[in-house]
Amino acid sequence: MKVSIGSKIFEGPWGGGNLFVKNLKNYLESKGVKVIFDLYDADIDLIVLTDPRKSSYSSTYTHKDIMNYLKYINEKAVVVQRFNECDERKNTKDVNNFMIQANVCSDKNIFVSNWLEEIYKRSGLTDKENQIIMTGADKEIFNNKDFHKWDEKSKFRIVTHHWGTNINKGFNEYKKLDSFIGEGDNSKTFEFTFIGNLPEDFEFIHSNHIEPLHGKNLSNELKRHHLYLTASKNEPSGNHHIEAAQCGLPILYLNSGGIPEFCKGFGLPFDEKNFFESLYEIKENYFDYREKVKSYPYDANKMCKEYYDLILDLIEKRDLYVEKRILSNPQLIENYSYFLFKQTFGRLIHRNKLLHNFYNYLIRGYLKFKSIIIK
């Protein structure tokens, strides 16, 4: 069996989408599945579209590439589109519509939360099969072994971590907490650590800032703390709170987006008006929440098994999906000669390590330059 996932894998800290691809790849390969990240083989059984946007540095192909692969190379491949982005997340205006347009190539859709599925249903995505598969983190790395329990005498240590710097990640609330710690004797009671990247011209005064961490280094740092805070707004799923919960930290979470689906019962929700009230409440009942989070169920093995079971089912029923498929969209189907040229050139570039690295360097520089010009 051969599965293609439309994303690069980056080493080091990079974000939740990268961890999803890495975990799924490792799990599928443990089951004997051949995993690739392009569309140059003629015998692909299933394609996972992770992000159809050409502007995405992590994406390796778009919905248009998939349509042409199905048209000219292998119509028997089954296609899954994974939804993990929306306009509500970063206050954009065109993501939802574009994702729906890209859905023309998909046989089945995967959403990372019920909240996100409802967003797309309201936006007009109604004619495909949907399934919810909730995200999980690697339990070999993120577990509660060697967790530092609070002794009720030392400072109550709060932590959060983010790769992205969009303001919706919760920076307004984190700034409020930073100011709160600087008031009166609060610094004797609370300590706050932010791990990750900060927005431009943003700084903490009374809190700790640590550059992005990943893997065991991140896990060990999380376990030094007692409470995890996420104020991320309209987050479809996220990985940060999952990693923390698996490490044994109760979650104080903004009641927004898909995050409550992952945190309900393992911490306490808050809104922008009752943040400090909720902070004191979870501190007061800390050990009750600490006991509950020990049974946190969302991990990468659970997530990957659901994907693997889905893949087996889709491949078994592939003929049913092929019969319903329409590949005649003139806006997406390329001239056959041009398509063959792109395939030949693409294989040469992407399967030669030296050329591939040089190509990625150029693309990354171009996208960075483009973002600066647009800004």
Image (cartoon, rainbow, N blue to C red):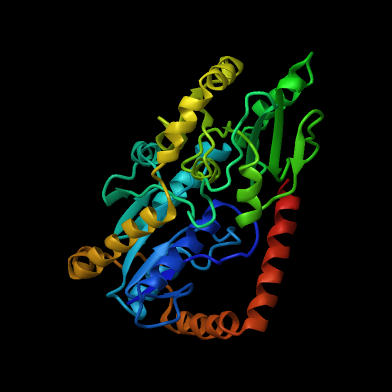
Give whichever of 362, 316 is nearer the camera: 316
Residue at 71%, 36% in the rendered image:
193
Location of the C terminus (image quadrant): top right
Residue 256 visible at all: no
Give whichever of 223, 89 is nearer the camera: 223
Picture coordinates of residue 233, whole percent (x, y): 55, 32
Picture coordinates of residue 153, whole percent (x, y): 67, 24
On screen, residue 139 versus residue 196, left or right, reads: left
Where is residue 82, by image quadrant?
bottom left
Residue at 71%, 70% in the rendered image:
362
On screen, residue 180 versus residue 151, left or right, reads: right
Location of the N terminus (image quadrant): bottom left
Picture coordinates of residue 308, whole percent (x, y): 32, 63
Picture coordinates of residue 286, whole percent (x, y): 53, 25
Residue at 70%, 52% in the rendered image:
371
Where is residue 114, by image quadrant?
top left
The relative height of residue 362 versus residue 80 in the rendered view (above or below) is below
